[in-house]
Image (tube, rainbow, N blue to C red):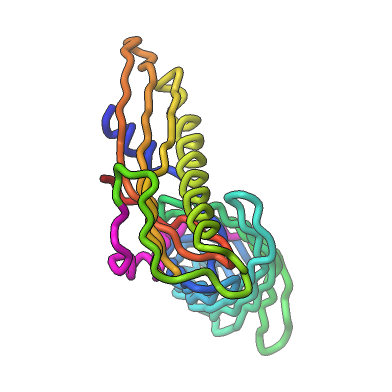
Amino acid sequence: MRKFLTLTVLASALAAPSAHAADIRLGLNTSAALGCQIVGVRAGVQSDRISVYGQASYCNAQNASGASFGAGVSYDVAKFNNLNLYLLGGIDTLPSGSLAASVGAGVRYSTPLLPVEGYLEAGAQFIRSSLVTVPGPRLALGINYRISVENLQGSMVPDPKQADATSVQYAGSAPAECNLTQEQDVASARATARSAASSGLSDAAGAYGAVYSGISYTVTVGGVSISGGSAKVSGSVKISATQRSSGEKVGGTFGGTINLTRSGCGWRATGYTQG
């Protein structure tokens, strides 16, 4: 049960990328297209709304099987809670020696406190050979492991005090164009941390609903430490539930720290450290 509670505390949903941070993505995908990419690996980096990536795939075709290499670029156009919509374009080499260009749109579902996200892409692909250009559909499905550059710098932000909900360590300020006071900036960080924790707990409660009933939780937000474009918010989560198979009531209280990075005039959650 303790493992369940720990996983529950960690589950969440991630916001859009920040103009002050970059995300590194490493992932696996599978695709169906005229270019016959079956399974591949993808690595890329995203800053603000723009992402660039490289990809290596295995192509299994009747006339020419082998490796396919490519690169692409995407642009986030909209965000709805945990979903990001984006446009993309790319080019791939094929085992036959031809080139395949592709355009399309994708949707990415991400979780704020877990560095994992899934994506689905659909569009058109155009294979250019020495004689003719052949159009066709393209569909790709994949999963990424996301590393925030701000997370790598997280040790520069001092840990806030767990017990004192009024504790504030403030070094730095929001961008001048945001016109935010220190109090407003701190309140925004607390609200973002609370929202990320609540979202993750809600998702996890649904996922574990078949095993536990009466799942309830309370999120308490504590101290805040802000240094430039990074922040840490301490807090605790009290969870209770009933195991369906035995009727046993279980629960616990867990402390931890949510890591944040600036996103425009607000914040986004990038990770969680259990206390």
The residue nearer to you, when weighing 27 against 94, is: 27
Asked if residue 44 is positioned above or below residue 30 in the image, the reply reads below
The answer to whether residue 94 shows anywhere in this view is: no
Q: Is 179 colored magenta in this rendering?
A: no
Asked if residue 1 is positioned above or below residue 65 in the image, the reply reads above
Q: How many marks?
A: 0
Asked if residue 243 is positioned above or below residue 255 in the image, the reply reads above
Q: How far across and how far down the image is residue 114, in percent?
A: 41, 51
Q: Residue at x 45, y 66 (%)?
A: 40
Q: How far across and how far down the image is residue 65, in percent?
A: 48, 71
Image quarter of residue 86? bottom right
Q: Is 144 colored magenta in this rendering?
A: yes
Q: Which residue is drawn at 66% across and 78% down?
A: 127
Q: Residue at x 58, y 50 (%)?
A: 82
Residue 84 relative to residue 52: left or right: right
Q: Give the range drawn in magenta.
A: 139-160
Residue 92 relative to residue 163: left or right: right
* Quadrant of the frame with the C terminus: top left
Q: How far across and how far down the image is residue 121, in percent?
A: 62, 60
The answer to whether residue 23 shows anywhere in this view is: yes
Q: How far across and how far down the image is residue 254, in percent?
A: 30, 36
* Quadrant of the frame with the N terminus: top left
Asked if residue 90 is positioned above or below residue 60 in the image, the reply reads below
Q: Residue at x 35, y 39 (%)?
A: 236
Q: Which residue lies furthest to the top in this view?
A: 247
The residue nearer to you, when weighing 10 against 239, is: 239
The residue nearer to you, when weighing 55 against 273, is: 273
